[in-house]
Amino acid sequence: MFFDIHAHVYKYQYPDGLGRMLMISPERLKERQDELGISRAVLLPLVSPELYVPQSVGEIIELADRSDGRWLAFCNVDPRVLTNSSDAPIGVLLEHYQKLGCLGIGEVLPNMPWSEPRLQNLLRCAQDCGMPLLFDMTGRLDTGYGIYDDPGMPQLEKSLERFPDLQFIGHGPAFWAEISILRQESDRFGYPAYPVIEEGRIAELMRCYPNLWVEISAGSGANAMLRDTEYAVTFISEFSDRIIFGTDICYDDQPVPQTGFLRELLNKGFITREIFENIAHANAERLLGI
């Protein structure tokens, strides 16, 4: 029933320093997907070092190739790779991974501004190769992970405008916090609990830029939907052709309220079967051409 655009898995897990292992293992990921009714998923390699231990794209391709079609591979490259410069030949890597079967790029999450020339180079190369790019966004620099933007996401907007043929897939706390206007800038650092005060920047950007998609994975995506169900229905109804289901499962027992939320909206008649199917799987399949 569900197509997960945002899955992680590590063949060789590692301790996170808090008594847990990162990421989820291949065997456990299959079990969780069976529990949640997820028939297919995109595996996203993590390659930037700010928080996670970098992962080989080859590991992801291998796991996808051995999954009998259950898992699909995205590739990922850090903007600092090869020459650590704004003219690094990143396109060579992207084209290489694309030939090996990768369908997109992500999860892109280096802790640098959208306007950083090395990141802009990655976006240019991504547009040239024709694969969509899934990003995580933050409101902080020099700590943690995620692409930085100012309140209102002006740097993201400039990137959307500069690369109109690149399909961006939005994700992360600083991104999803702006489903509403903000009470304060620090709301971008977590999961705001208050209802949507007034329509935020996400809806405005999606109306202006058809190359912006969103995915509802993790605590940030779940919070954006659950904090104000009435507005969530409005948002979903308007943008049902560019909203994609995702989980972002990292730990064995991580909750995934998104499945129950979407089913409840359908069962109560808040969304149509067509809208449900679009978000659950059809949008992702159309975006990836499968």
Image (spheres, rainbow, N blue to C red):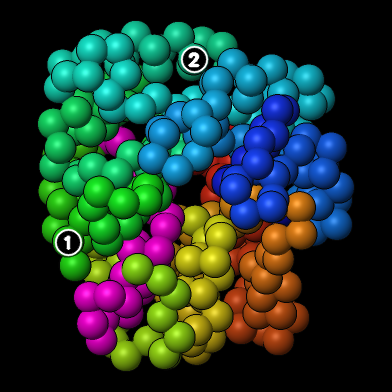
In the image, the segment drawn in magenta is 165-188
Q: For the residue carrying disc 1, how many other residues have a C-alpha within 10 Å: few (<14), some (14-19), or many (20+)? A: some
Q: For the residue carrying disc 2, how many other residues have a C-alpha within 10 Å: few (<14), some (14-19), or many (20+)? A: many
Magenta stretch holds residue 38: no
Nearer-N-terminus badge (2/1): 2
- Cα distance, mark 2 to mark 1? 32 Å
As drawn, the label of residue 150 is 1
Q: Quadrant of the N terminus?
A: bottom right
Note whether 64 is above or below 156 in the view shown. above
Residue 168: where, in percent of width, then height? 35, 44
Label 1: which secondary element? loop
Residue 67: where, in percent of width, then height? 79, 26
Say which amino acid is labelled 1. Answer: Asp
Note whether 86 is above or below 181 in the view shown. above
- Please report the residue visible at 78 percent of the width from the left and 20 percent of the height from the top: 66
Residue 11: where, in percent of width, then height? 72, 28
Q: Quadrant of the C terminus?
A: top right
User: Which residue, given by chain and number where applicable, does mark 2 sit on?
Assistant: 97
